[in-house]
Amino acid sequence: MRQKTRILSCYCDMTGNCRLSNLLKIIQEIGARDIANRGFGKDKIFDQGMRWVISRIATKVNRIPAYDEEIEIVTFPEPPKWFFLPRYTVVLDKDGNVLLEDETIWAVIDSKTRKPVLPSQINLDIEYKDEREKTLAVDSKIVPLETDKTLDRKVLFTDCDINQHMNNTVYVEWACDLLGSEYLKSKKLVDWRMAYHTEAKEGETLTMNYALKDDVLYVIGQVGERKVYEVWLKFE
């Protein structure tokens, strides 16, 4: 699937660039639309008591798009691996230059049991065909740092999504808050990775244990002793 869109001012942060969390929302919504166009939309998933979740994200960044810039997003699914449904996405500028390349791991879960559903159980049989050559080497491995700082934040209503839990885009939004505007204005994001482990629900207190070393920010979000997510951001 290919779709063009424009970066509105409401998508941007203090730097004038698209907020990373909003860029992820755009990418994920177009990915969901692509799956719907392939026959697995709301009627086949949501209305049948299932939900899409994203367990892993790895992104190689050349440049974050800026306010009023037109971009084109190319996205397509790759063959499933057990419960998991990989998806490749590339974001291009108006001249066709690669702004970022993104690999995500999607899965379907039962909304009541919260357990994953095998693609074969719901006849998730779609054609897998690369629509574009992969141009960047995307590494999804998260190398933890020894954390030396801690911040608690309560999960609120607006942090949660249709799946009734904290949305994955909030992970990176809270990570950027740890860095602040002065750091983010002076640095360029070149690589970021996310791993989802368990759900964080509205009203829970999430502890972010984190470290910034050699322009790499590592965050592990926990509710008590329960690991919720990890975020890894590399700057230069």
Image (cartoon, grey):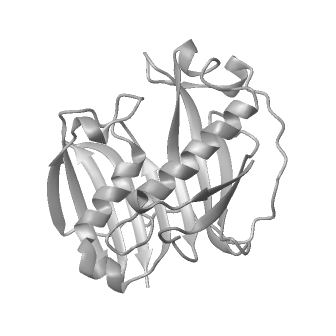
Residue at the location (70% across, 75% down)?
A: 97
Measured from the top left, where is residue 226 in percent x and y? Answer: 27, 41
Seen in the picture, residue 175 relative to 34 is either above or below; the reply is below
The image quadrant of residue 80 is: top right
Residue at the location (48% across, 24% down)?
A: 115
Q: Is residue 123 left or right of residue 159?
A: right
State the residue in front, 57 or 158.
158
Measured from the top left, where is residue 40 in percent x and y? Answer: 69, 26
Q: Is residue 216 left or right of residue 192?
A: left
Q: Is residue 213 something one can see in this rendering?
A: no
Q: Is residue 209 something one can see in this rendering?
A: yes
Measured from the top left, where is residue 138 in percent x and y? Answer: 62, 67
Q: Is residue 31 left or right of residue 23?
A: right
Q: From the image, which quarter does the C terminus lie in?
A: bottom left
Seen in the picture, residue 90 relative to 111 is either above or below; the reply is below
Residue at the location (73% across, 33% down)?
A: 37
Seen in the picture, residue 30 relative to 193 is either above or below; the reply is above
Measured from the top left, where is residue 157 in percent x and y? Answer: 24, 35
Residue at the location (23% across, 56% down)?
A: 208
The image quadrant of residue 211 is: bottom left
State the residue in front, 223 or 99.
99
Q: How many marks?
A: 0
State the residue in front, 26 or 218.
26
